[in-house]
């Protein structure tokens, strides 16, 4: 009986997987045989222009980043074999936390093994049943999961809709909620939409709410000096809590952080479960990330080049005839609407020498399938032109563009 019960379980999984394949919703992984970069070598021997990494500043495969990581490993070793409060904190971790706080204009910061952990461990230690969390409907899964772990009242406002946000704030006030916090992505990664932080902060101040922003797709390159969406919207000092990642623009490895007032960070050190029960961030990552923040604080060259590449690609892809989500962010969703078509298009781009990924339900809403392009400061103009030519050819071949 026991083996029969297990077989029923395995059969169910197989049916579900086959169903995903038949619907064109099954996700496959491309395997790289090189470091991350504007061009990558895949395991089948093909070299492709890479348009699907979060490597916004081109630092993932950067030699200076690599050398900083090697130097940190040489000094601090490979790992800590411990959590932070037992014997897993080194000077490089404290230096990085101070650097993150300074870079973002906050009092203090705390490191996590991943940005998912930063969001997952944020709400439960800070907010209780009498409180309210008001969350954008399209927030990242890590924010959603973090809110689920908290007993505070949950309110959700329609994506980027300030009128509905005010309605939810009023509902929380009418319910007599004690503390209120608005939680939003700084940049919504599927669309490249930038949250309206100026209006959010205005509403928060009117209703006595805190503002929490996940800036994973903004730290390092949004704003005049790359501090993030709060700098982009000129609300530095008005955002209360910022979470983010070291795994995108800031080097592309892994690791997350929360930056806020000292009281918030001290509370998280005492009570945040992902921090208390996860191994310390590897010294190699901490050392390289510290080097990157020092580098970005001295120059906006990489940030400027990224935005030049973004403006160029956005204009050119529209001129070819594709529909894109409007905006200024280096996430450029090329809308194809159909899941199978998005996968076929991405596969044809691969054959033409471009690595890009099709996104479809449930990652994006049904009927909103797309190929998401992500620009990098490392892309050359020649690489972008070759990629644009591949988009045009694939579009004509699949009947998306007029021949």
Image: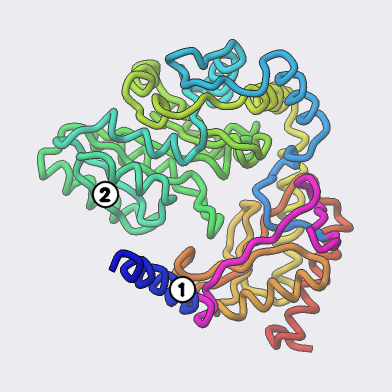
Quarter of the image for residue 238 reads top left
Q: Is residue 33 magenta?
A: yes
Can you identify the residue that label 1 sits on? 14
Can you identify the residue that label 2 sits on? 166
Spot occupied by residue 234 in the image (x, y as percentages of width and height): 51, 34
| Camera-nearest residue between 12 and 395 | 12
Quarter of the image for residue 378 reads top right
Judged left or right of residue 138, residue 358 is right
Residue plotted at (80% across, 25% down): 67
Quarter that holds the N terminus: bottom left
Mark 2 and mark 1 residues within 8 Å of each other at the beta carbon: no
- The image shows residue 392, relative to residue 255, as above or below, that is below
Q: CA distance from mark 2 to mark 1?
A: 45 Å
Q: Earlier in the sequence, mark 2 or mark 1?
A: 1
Q: Is residue 308 magenta?
A: no
Q: Main secondary structure of the magenta part?
A: loop
Quarter that holds the C terminus: bottom right
Spot occupied by residue 180 in the image (x, y as percentages of width and height): 24, 36
The image's colouring method is: rainbow
Spot occupied by residue 321 in the image (x, y as percentages of width and height): 70, 77
Judged left or right of residue 215, residue 293 is right
> Regarding mark 1 in the picture, which secondary structure is present there?
helix
Residue plotted at (54% across, 71% down): 26
Q: Residues within 10 Å of mark 1 (few under 14, many from 20)?
A: few
- The image shows residue 278, relative to residue 388, as above or below, that is above
Q: Which portion, as a residue range, is magenta?
A: 20-47
Judged left or right of residue 109, residue 267 is left
Residue plotted at (81% across, 59% down): 49
Judged left or right of residue 325, residue 174 is left
């Amino acid at each position: 009986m026991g083996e029969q019960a297990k077989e029923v379980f395995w059969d169910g999984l197989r049916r579900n997987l086959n169903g995903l394949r038949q619907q064109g919703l099954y996700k496959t992984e491309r395997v790289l045989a090189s470091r991350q970069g504007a061009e990558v070598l895949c395991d089948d021997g093909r070299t492709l222009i890479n348009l699907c990494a979060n490597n916004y500043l081109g630092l993932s495969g950067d030699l200076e980043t690599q050398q900083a990581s090697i130097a940190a490993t040489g000094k601090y070793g490979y790992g800590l074999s411990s959590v932070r409060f037992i014997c897993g904190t080194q000077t490089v971790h404290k230096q990085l936390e101070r650097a993150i706080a300074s870079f973002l204009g906050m009092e203090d910061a705390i490191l996590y093994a991943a940005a998912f952990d930063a969001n997952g461990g944020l709400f439960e230690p800070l907010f209780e049943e009498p409180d309210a969390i008001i969350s954008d409907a399209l927030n990242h899964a890590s924010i959603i999961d973090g809110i689920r772990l908290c007993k505070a009242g949950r309110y959700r406002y329609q994506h980027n809709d300030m009128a509905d946000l005010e309605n939810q704030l009023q509902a929380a006030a009418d319910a007599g909620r004690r503390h209120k916090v608005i939680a939003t992505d700084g940049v919504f990664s599927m669309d490249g939409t930038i949250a309206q932080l100026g209006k959010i902060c205005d509403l928060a101040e009117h209703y006595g709410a805190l503002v929490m922003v996940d800036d994973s797709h903004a730290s390092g390159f949004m704003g005049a000096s790359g501090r993030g969406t709060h700098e982009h919207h000129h609300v530095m000092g008005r955002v209360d809590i910022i979470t983010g990642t070291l795994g995108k623009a800031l080097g592309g490895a892994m690791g997350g952080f929360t930056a806020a007032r000292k009281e918030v960070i001290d509370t998280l050190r005492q009570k945040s479960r992902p921090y208390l029960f996860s191994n310390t961030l590897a010294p190699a990552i901490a050392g390289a990330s510290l080097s990157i923040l020092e580098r970005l604080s001295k120059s906006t060259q990489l940030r400027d080049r990224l935005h030049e590449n973004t403006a160029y690609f956005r204009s050119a892809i529209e001129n070819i005839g594709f529909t894109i989500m409007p905006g200024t962010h280096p996430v450029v969703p090329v809308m194809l609407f159909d899941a199978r078509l998005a996968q076929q298009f991405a596969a044809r781009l691969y054959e033409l020498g471009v690595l890009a990924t099709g996104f479809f339900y449930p990652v994006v809403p049904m009927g909103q399938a797309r190929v998401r392009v992500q620009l990098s400061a490392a892309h050359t103009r020649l690489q972008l032109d070759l990629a644009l030519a591949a988009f045009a050819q694939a579009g004509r071949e699949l009947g998306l563009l007029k021949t």
